[in-house]
């Protein structure tokens, strides 16, 4: 194989420690093209920018590494990279490393996973990485081997078109890497009401995660709590095939 | 059954013709609570607002109908409705009617479907509706019977927690309603490059949809082209269970 090309994006912005750790973990394995938001885009899911134009800026260029910032979302970054910035299709799309977990239903809201899903939509093997540490100065060093192992495996074996991987990692020592499914859960009591100096009410998103199946041993939430890294294969086909059969009996 | 409560949101904003058509189609069937963005939020997917506070405003109140506008995304609207605005849990969440299709992979980017998915995450039966007409003055009258039939069916039979319905409808005459799966496809050649008056480049998102399986007769794209309304059961569990078995053989 020629030296592969890896496209990297994230949702914490091009300056974040997580994406710069990710670049440092893989730059000896491939040429690296970074196209990442010019600031934080947490919770952007697969949002695209339809109502205003996008700008990109070359931030850094050296042998085997080019870094662009972009005014859009993680999905915009991947689309611009594939359509306008790169002449060759990347062999792999990586997104992250996110400052904070994207396990269970958080995969739905995650800009990190939005970036990885976009790679998968275009048929490119893609992985999103997240660490269970929300701090700006989080220590990503425990992820080095996990990242390199996952990248080596996916570069050699590929992934089916339309499927990416959602990799979440606990803080500190990692007991192992486990393939599993997305836990059922949801965020709850999600808003804090405040009153502004002009006596008008406003709301801050907050709340906590509720695991709807705390004892299910084959889920990302369970394995992360035990200290394992979780790998969930994530599909861009959202069809529920069980319900599809059931619905055919309805009188529509 | 007592008179049910239906929560309605959309991504085209509270003033859009689509959501006001939807309200008029169902207001004799239920009490209606509308919480919808205060302007267009197309392409917002399941984005949430984490970096600034949200405001809501009561726009209209009459017997059996309350309409709020919200400064956030469709998902923010559903979360605020469930957490702060309504004392009782809605029996049904409706999102739309979108001005434009959300078939195939567009379900991933759609703010309309983001709103419906959020209802499903909270275990409430939810339906997203979209019409194949992107104009502000689109004619939604052909959807009246489809909407009422779907609403009556889902109110009486429910939906499993974590599954919502993605209903797309062609313009004009509807040949029937078909249950089907999401077509594989993607948007391509997605940007138009322009130069601003200061001689700097910028990009507009544009492009066209490419169906990767044009002849697959069991897909939403195929059935919509033939003039049928498509109903795709859509899951918030994004796990790819086929790939999960395959991945367990990998050496991670």
Image (cartoon, coloured by chain):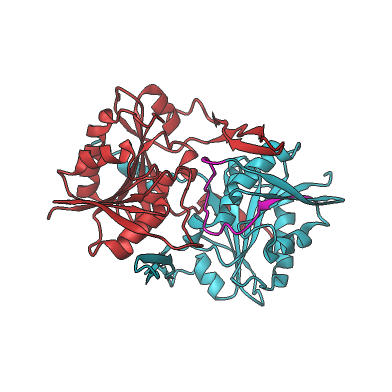
Chain colours: A cyan, B red
**Closer-to-camera residue (A171/B251):** A171
Give the residue displayed 27% in from the left and 28% down from the top: B142
Q: Which residues are magenta?
A: A32-52
Q: Is residue A62 left or right of residue A50?
A: right
Judged from this view, the residue extending furthest toward the right is: A63
Q: Position of residue B198 (x, y in %)?
A: 70, 38
Report if residue A239 is visible in the image: yes
**Closer-to-camera residue (A14/B150):** A14
Give the residue displayed 73% in from the left and 71% down from the top: A141
Residue B228's image quarter?
Answer: top left
Q: Is residue B11 located in the magenta-colored stretch of the structure? A: no
Residue A26's image quarter?
Answer: bottom right
Q: From what the image shows, is residue B108 above or below residue B174? A: below
Q: Identify the image quadrant of the N terminus of chain B.
A: bottom left
Residue B194's image quarter?
Answer: top right
Q: Position of residue A216 (x, y in %)?
A: 45, 68
Q: Is residue A44 located in the magenta-colored stretch of the structure? A: yes
């Amino acid at each position: 194989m020629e030296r592969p090309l890896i496209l990297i994006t994230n949702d914490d912005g091009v300056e974040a420690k997580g994406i710069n750790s990710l670049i440092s973990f893989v730059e000896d394995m491939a040429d690296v093209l970074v196209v990442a938001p010019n600031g934080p885009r947490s919770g952007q899911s697969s949002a695209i920018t339809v109502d205003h134009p996008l700008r990109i800026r070359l931030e850094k260029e050296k042998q085997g590494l080019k870094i662009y910032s972009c005014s859009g979302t993680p999905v915009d970054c991947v689309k611009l990279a594939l359509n306008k910035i790169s002449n060759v299709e990347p062999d792999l799309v990586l997104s992250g490393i996110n400052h904070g977990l994207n396990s269970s239903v958080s995969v739905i809201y995650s800009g990190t996973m939005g970036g990885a899903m976009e790679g998968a939509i275009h048929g490119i093997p893609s992985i999103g990485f997240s660490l269970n540490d929300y701090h700006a100065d989080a220590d990503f060093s425990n992820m080095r081997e996990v990242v390199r192992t996952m990248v080596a495996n996916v570069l050699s074996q590929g992934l089916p078109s339309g499927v990416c991987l959602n990799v979440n990692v606990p803080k500190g020592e990692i007991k192992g890497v486990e393939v599993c499914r997305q836990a059922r859960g949801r965020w709850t009591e999600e808003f804090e009401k405040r009153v502004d100096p002009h006596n008008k009410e406003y709301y801050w998103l907050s709340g906590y995660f509720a695991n709807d199946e705390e004892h299910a041993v084959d889920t990302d939430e369970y394995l992360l709590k035990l200290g394992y890294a979780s790998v969930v294969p994530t599909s861009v086909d959202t069809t529920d095939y069980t319900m599809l059969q059931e619905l055919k009996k309805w009188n529509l």
